[in-house]
Image: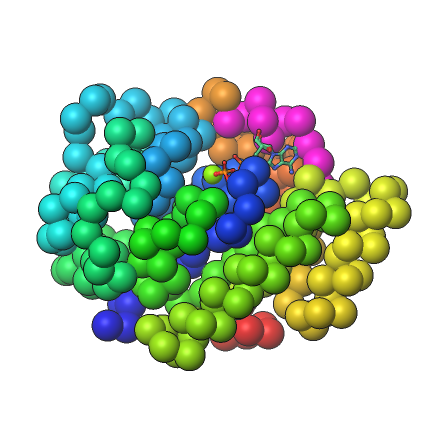
Amino acid sequence: MTPVVQTIAVSNRKGGTGKTTVAVNLAAEFAAAGRRVLLVDLDSQSHCAVGLGVKVARGAPTVHDLFRAGAATLESSVRATAYPFLSLAPGDPLFEHGSGFRDQGLLSQALAEPAITDAFDLVILDTPPSLDILLLNALRAAHGVIVPYVPHPLSLEGVKQLMRVLFMIKSGENPDLKIYGLLPVMVAEHIREHRAITGEIEHQFGAPKVLAGIRTDIKLAESFGTGQPIRIYAPKSRAAEDFAALGRTLAGVCEGRAYQ
Ligand SMILES: Nc1ncnc2c1ncn2[C@@H]1O[C@H](COP(=O)(O)OP(=O)(O)OP(=O)(O)O)[C@@H](O)[C@H]1O
Ligand SMILES: [Mg+2]
């Protein structure tokens, strides 16, 4: 089933590569630009709720109910945040990755429900750092993928592994899936190693696929702890500047105005 609402997955098989930070802050950028955004937290670490200051009571509906019930119940988990146009389908800390229904199409079916297509212009999927049925659901449901990576020698292998999964999905379940970009995060431009790794990634996957990065900024970690996107917590910070630029670039990519 082709997704109806523009859907972007933020994925990397490696842990701690800034996926959740990117998903939350990018969602906030698009919402601030007036797009009705649904952030879906497919990771049972459930950190998106923390980053947006949303309290989820134990037993409250979550996106993971889809995988427990095998039915489209996404709408019941959707809740407003303190930020205009930004809603969250939270993850469930009690969901065991590897359990539940094995159907790769559950999420795309749920996102095609009128309750979602009528209410939102854009869906952003935060994904777990593993190759499991939740990641496969995300890649099946997405129009495009953003792959955040830390420019470190170990990252190259993680990016290559994910690219192999993306090509597998493109040649089967979701032929229209686009790679919207590889995104260096926690970048320190003066570190030669960072430039070398990004140079290697450009060489392997094509320079136009590498997006302008998000620089290292402790304010990102601080803002997460306060439940505020960086654009609210520290609007003049370099991370806020980088996320604003990323939002503008991706708005162009989503509309087909830039390289896909
Ligand atoms: N640009 C940045 N500058 C400084 N710290 C950052 C930056 N991006 C992310 N971080 C920090 O790095 C840590 C990991 O980030 P995050 O949780 O977003 O990664 P993740 O890929 O979602 O992790 P996981 O694989 O566990 O889901 C967090 O403490 C976050 O605050
Ligand atoms: Mg995460």
Task: Pick whichever, 193 or 160, lies toward us.
Answer: 160
Question: Which residue corresponds to the image point at 33% horizontal and 73% vertical from the top-left?
Answer: 173
**Quadrant of the image occupied by residue 186:** top right
Task: Pick whichever, 166 or 178, lies toward us.
Answer: 166
Q: Magenta region's main secondary structure?
A: helix
Q: From the top left corner, tell me how far across and down residue 11 is, in percent.
A: 48, 52
Q: Is residue 7 left or right of residue 184?
A: left
Q: Is residue 10 left or right of residue 160?
A: left
Residue 98 seen from this side: yes
Question: Which residue corresponds to the image point at 12% horizontal and 46% vertical from the top-left?
Answer: 69
Quadrant (top left/top right/bottom left/bottom right) for the N terminus: bottom left
* Residue 219 located within the stretch drawn in magenta: yes
Number of numbered labels in the structure image:
0
Residue 214 seen from this side: no
**Quadrant of the image occupied by residue 94:** top left
Question: Which residue corresponds to the image point at 83% horizontal and 55% vertical from the top-left?
Answer: 196
Q: From the top left corner, tell me how far across and down residue 150 is, in percent.
A: 67, 45
* Residue 213 located within the stretch drawn in magenta: no
Quadrant (top left/top right/bottom left/bottom right) for the C terminus: bottom right
Q: Is residue 93 above or below residue 65?
A: above
Question: Which residue corresponds to the image point at 82% horizontal and 52% vertical from the top-left?
Answer: 195
Chain part drawn in magenta: 215-224
Of the four image quadrants, the one with ligand 1 is top right
Q: From the top left corner, tell me how far across and down residue 117 is, in percent.
A: 22, 60
Q: From the top left corner, tell me how far across and down residue 116 is, in percent.
A: 21, 55
